[in-house]
Structure formats: structure tokens, C-alpha cells
């Protein structure tokens, strides 16, 4: 059974940083595509970043390029999202997700993935 558990959310001032963590069980991240998504109040879910296991490529939404970094620790079966230069518009519930279908990163960012965590809230406010 695939389980994903996010942590690391919280309140941060604009310009600050946070690192989100997603611990995976029931999957081996060496073989699964993995990503981060977010949903702000009153808005649709948005793909933030993902890693394609087919070639190790990383993908980012234009809104976070240059500020966010996704990376994994396969020994710990964990994926991280380092978020720097945070803005109020980054406020959202952030979800970790994974998938075995092997689609492109851009596909996942638009359509989502098959398995989801419960999310962690990030609030960027002064």
C-alpha cells in the first residue's frame, strides 16, 4: 500500500525559506515518478515540481522556477521541496504525489499523479 506523509509546513515571512519533506512507504522512489503539488484557497490544484525517473529530469512550474528545488534521498525513500524567496502567493496546502506510469514531467504537472499524501499547509505572511 502506497503511503505518503508530508511535513515541514508552517508560517513564514515573505522572503523566507521552508523545506518540505515527504516520507514514502509501499513504494521505492528509485522506480516511481514523484512530485509536489499545491492548492491555494479557492483555486485549483497546481503542479509545482516533479522528478521523472525515466531520465532523472526535474520539472518546475514557471511560478517557482529559480526559487524551489526538488530532490530525493533514495536511501531514506524521501523527497524534499526546498522553497526559497517565498511569496504570499505561495500560500497553499502542499501535497506530495507519486506515480508508476512513466509519463513526462509536464504531463504530471498538468494532470496530477495517482497516489497522494494528505498535505501540509504553508502560509507566507508578515
Image (spheres, rainbow, N blue to C red):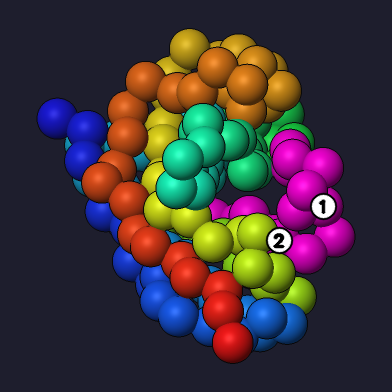
Residue furthest to the front: 42
- Asked whether 117 or 91 is in front, the reply is 91
Q: Residue at horizontal 85%, vertical 60%?
A: 66
Vertical arrangement, residue 26 with respect to residue 8, above or below: above
Q: Which residue is mark 1?
A: 65
- SS class, disc 2: strand
Vertical arrangement, residue 25 with respect to residue 1, above or below: below
Q: Are marks 2 and 1 in contact (CB under 8 Å)?
A: yes
Residue 104 in which image quadrant: top right
- SS class, disc 1: loop
Percent position (x, y) of residue 15?
73, 82
- Asked whether 37 or 14 is in front, the reply is 14
Percent position (x, y) of residue 27?
30, 35
Percent position (x, y) of residue 41?
44, 48
Instruction: Please tell me the numbered disc located at residue 68.
Output: 2
Identify the magenta region.
59-72
Percent position (x, y) of residue 44?
51, 31
Give the left or right position of residue 73, taking residue 85 as reference: left
Q: Residue at horizontal 14%, vertical 30%?
A: 1
Amino acid at each position: 500500500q502506497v503511503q505518503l506523509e508530508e511535513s515541514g509546513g508552517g508560517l513564514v515571512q515573505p522572503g523566507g525559506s521552508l523545506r518540505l519533506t515527504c516520507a514514502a512507504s509501499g513504494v521505492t522512489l528509485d522506480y516511481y515518478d514523484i512530485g509536489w503539488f499545491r492548492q491555494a484557497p479557492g483555486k485549483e490544484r497546481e503542479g509545482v515540481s516533479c522528478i521523472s525517473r525515466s531520465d532523472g529530469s526535474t520539472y518546475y512550474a514557471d511560478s517557482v522556477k529559480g526559487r524551489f528545488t526538488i530532490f530525493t534521498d533514495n536511501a531514506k525513500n524521501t523527497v524534499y521541496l526546498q522553497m526559497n524567496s517565498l511569496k504570499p502567493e505561495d500560500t497553499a496546502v502542499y501535497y506530495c504525489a507519486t506515480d508508476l506510469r512513466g509519463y513526462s514531467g509536464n504531463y504530471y504537472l498538468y494532470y496530477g499523479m495517482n497516489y497522494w499524501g494528505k498535505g501540509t499547509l504553508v502560509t507566507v505572511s508578515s
